[in-house]
Amino acid sequence: MAGVSAGNREWDGASYDRISAPQARWGQAVLERLELAGDETVLDAGCGSGRVTERLLARLPRGRVVAVDASASMLDQARARLGQADGRVSYVQADLLHLRPRDLAGAVPLDAVLSTATFHWVTDHDRLFANLFALLRPGGQLVAQCGAKGNIDGVISAVRSLGVERAGTWLYATPEETKKRLERAGFTDIEVWSHPEPTPFPERQVLEEFLETVCLREHLASLAPSQRRPFAGAVAAAMPEPVIDYVRLNIVARRGLGSNHD
Ligand SMILES: C[S@@+](CC[C@H](N)C(=O)[O-])C[C@H]1O[C@@H](n2cnc3c(N)ncnc32)[C@H](O)[C@@H]1O
């Protein structure tokens, strides 16, 4: 459990698995950017409940996936979904900010790192990218997507309109900042861009569960359980429409062929 502390690391894995259709949809598009022959070893960095991991495994019939997440509840859900996949998947509970090659014994150097909807929860991207770089073989790919600058601004405004200053702790970086950070970590062939992904929730109850499980998770953890859903309901009511204004940051990069493994 490299560097994992209790507290606000925890998610409700079962609820996330139920309501994460938007992340699964975006993750499929991100996964298609990975160049795979089918026999590679790939890290899913922040695998969550394993919905995207399952699709990654399907692209690796002769390969392996290392599924890393800080949340025990998410990893339990991923195990329930994927099982052992004929020994092609292993699970590691770890904080990406503390992940070292020795935590992935036997799997490093990796051919690729995939990460979806996770990096914005990790607020030191210099350290994050340096850690991931150290796990990759020369020529290995990093393909990721997370929240970009402007992500869920409307939800944050709705929270503030209720007198709560801070709904969560995220790093919503710009493409320009991210490109510089990736260069500093040693990556090459870098492409970074953002795009809006407004996400409608026609059913009020689904919007409230989604806000409770994902966007407001950190703030709600500081409230009594009985106050959580009412607060999510108040935020939903304060939003101008039942649409979450997601903005996604897309990353494609490589560890250069000339860089030796540490
Ligand atoms: C929104 S979920 C995304 C899950 C999955 N990749 C998907 O696309 O559905 C974010 C995940 O990142 C994990 N996470 C957040 N910060 C982390 C960290 N520092 N180290 C490891 N996992 C982290 C959370 O536990 C959670 O499972």
Image (spheres, rainbow, N blue to C red):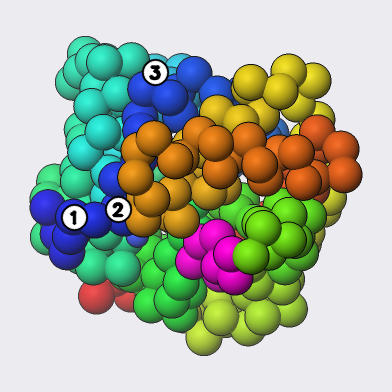
Q: Element type at marker 3?
A: loop
Q: How many marks?
A: 3
Q: CA distance from mark 2 to mark 3?
A: 32 Å
Label 2 within 8 A of ligand 1 by Cβ: yes
Q: Earlier in the sequence, mark 1 or mark 3?
A: 1
Q: In terms of depth relative to the viewer, which is nearer, 133 or 177?
A: 177
Can residue 59 be found in the magenta stretch?
no
What residue is shown with label 1?
6
What residue is shown with label 2?
9
Horizontal side, residue 210 vs residue 2: left or right: right
Dot 1 surroundings within 10 Å: few (below 14), some, or many (20 or more)? few
Q: Element type at marker 1?
A: loop
> Residue 183 appears at what percent x and percent y?
57, 81
| Residue found 73% across the figure and 18% down from its top | 203
Q: Earlier in the sequence, mark 2 or mark 3?
A: 2
Q: CA distance from mark 1 to mark 3?
A: 35 Å
Q: Tell me which amino acid carries mark 2.
A: Arg
- Which dot marks residue 61? 3
> Residue 63 appears at what percent x and percent y?
34, 28
Q: In terms of depth relative to the viewer, which is nearer, 147 or 206?
A: 206
Horizontal side, residue 25 vs residue 41: left or right: right
The mark lying in front, picked from 1 and 3, is 1
Query: Does 2 appear above or below 241?
Result: below
Quadrant housing residue 146: bottom right
Q: In terms of depth relative to the viewer, which is nearer, 213 or 52?
A: 213
Horizontal side, residue 244 vs residue 13: left or right: right
In magenta, the rendered stretch is 164-171
Q: Element type at marker 2?
A: loop
Q: Are the residues at dot 2 and dot 1 in contact (C-beta closer than 8 Å)? A: yes
Dot 2 surroundings within 10 Å: few (below 14), some, or many (20 or more)? some
Q: Tell me which amino acid carries mark 3.
A: Pro
